[in-house]
Amino acid sequence: MKIWAPLLAVLALVIIAWLGAGVFEWTSLFGIIIPYTAFAILVLGFIYRVIKWAQSPVPFRIPTTCGQQESLPWIKQDKIENPSKTWEVVGRMALEILFFRSLFRNTQTEKREDKLGFGSSKWLWLGSLVFHWSMLIIVLRHLRYFLYPVPAFVQGLEKLDGFLQVGVPVLYLTDVFVVLGITYLFLRRVVIPQVKYISLAADYFPLFLLLGIATSGILMRYGLKVDIASVKDFAMSLVTFKPQVIPEIGTIFYVHLFLVSSLVAYFPWSKLMHAGGIFMSPTRNLANNSRAVRHINPWNYEVKTHTYEEYEDEFREKMRKVGLPLERE
Amino acid sequence: MMYNGGKIITGLIIFALIITAPFWLNIGQADEPPEISLDTPVINQLSEKECIESAEFMRSQHPQLLNDWRDQVVREGKTVYTSSSGKEYQISLDNTCLQCHSNRSEFCDACHAYTSVDPYCWDCHGGGIAK
């Protein structure tokens, strides 16, 4: 059920787009209204979620560390595992976001006869890295539909991605890698019993949706074919706010577009928000300077104090009469 | 009430700027889509202006067609293409396609630049025509 429901949901999305844009020809709905709405949901939803998270107080420093913290000058600090300055945190975060450093330390426990063994497990790290980097390059490559003239870095990225020069249009390596990455991430959820046990429909749905997006895109490029100049005309009309649907673009294009719209509209309300969440992780984005800086809990209530000076002011006359020493006459 | 509001709002502004980049980068920048020119001496002399297949087919399928042509000539030694209407054409980018479409920069390159396609066909072919 956890697997079949999301799979059917994605298939339903494909059928909805196929029927809506292909059979009933509601092209303005599927080409203009839904993409604009979905994009607005992504941007506003993302900001809403982050602002909501920002309302949780983080009174004290709680970074997870696994290295020597800043100490005496002759003790070498591990600046990445235990950062104490902002720029060290920036380095740590950058490595985490770009190379998934904490996932690199993933371990696996295995029972061998009556002994428990711990070993390094890099497959999840590798699979995630392959998927996320392919995804990033694919998204950046798509800028060629939204900008004219096309910036040089997008062209360079395409060149690099298709450098094997297999076929015409050339095969993009990221198209292969993204499917491999998603397939791996799916298979580990069904093959490893412990992972399968904790996997929910919300884990499978994004995987199927991404696989649907990749498949429809690959099908459009290498199989069913669409007129790419019309696609660009259409994409440019969207980003210049002069939306105009081009009726001759094949239905496969609308399937791809509708699946992408579904993904971006789903994004802010799902686990996919880890993209924003990683920046908001207090166990990672805080410098470990608890011993150097005093952090005061922001919601500490005002404590009523009565200092000695105030006490003396209050009882000065009486103290002087009985001959007690005074700080101030 | 937000904690670390300054940093988070800065981050969110950067996020919004990056994700909406295609919208604001195009303000006043976007060039007009290219005009595809069919004005060449050979095409002008044709009584019936038609390509080897329908224009719709050629628009979306010409890369695939050229790829198939390459395989047919180089690997199978087949040099004649029979179109869906039954006409026969020599399989050659230089001698068939570019014979009519001799204005590469206004025809081929216009759309290729528009959609950022840089086919490696031109590494060998099309040398006789000015870019």
Image (tube, coloured by chain):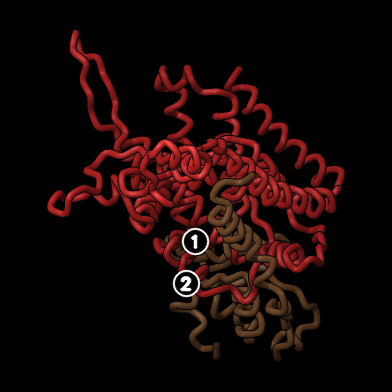
Chain colours: A red, B brown
Q: Is residue A117 visible?
A: yes
**Chain that bears disc 2:** B
Residue B45 picture location, percent across and down: 76, 88
Residue type, mark 1 in image: Val
Residue pointed to by mark 2: B120
In the rendered view, does B62 fall on the left or right side of A243? left
Q: Are marks 2 and 1 on the same chain?
A: no
- Secondary structure of the residue carrying numbered label 1: loop
Residue type, mark 2 in image: Tyr
Please state which of residues B23 and A315 is positioned toward the viewer in this rendering: A315
Q: Tell me which residue sits at (46%, 70%) in the image.
A: A156
Residue pointed to by mark 1: A170
Residue A170 picture location, percent across and down: 49, 61
How many marks are shown on the rendered structure?
2
Q: Are marks 2 and 1 in contact (CB under 8 Å)?
A: yes
User: For residue A271, which quarter of the picture?
Assistant: top right
* Crowding at mark 2 (Cα within 10 Å: few <14, some 14-19, many 20+): few
Q: Tell me which residue sits at (75%, 57%) in the image.
A: A249
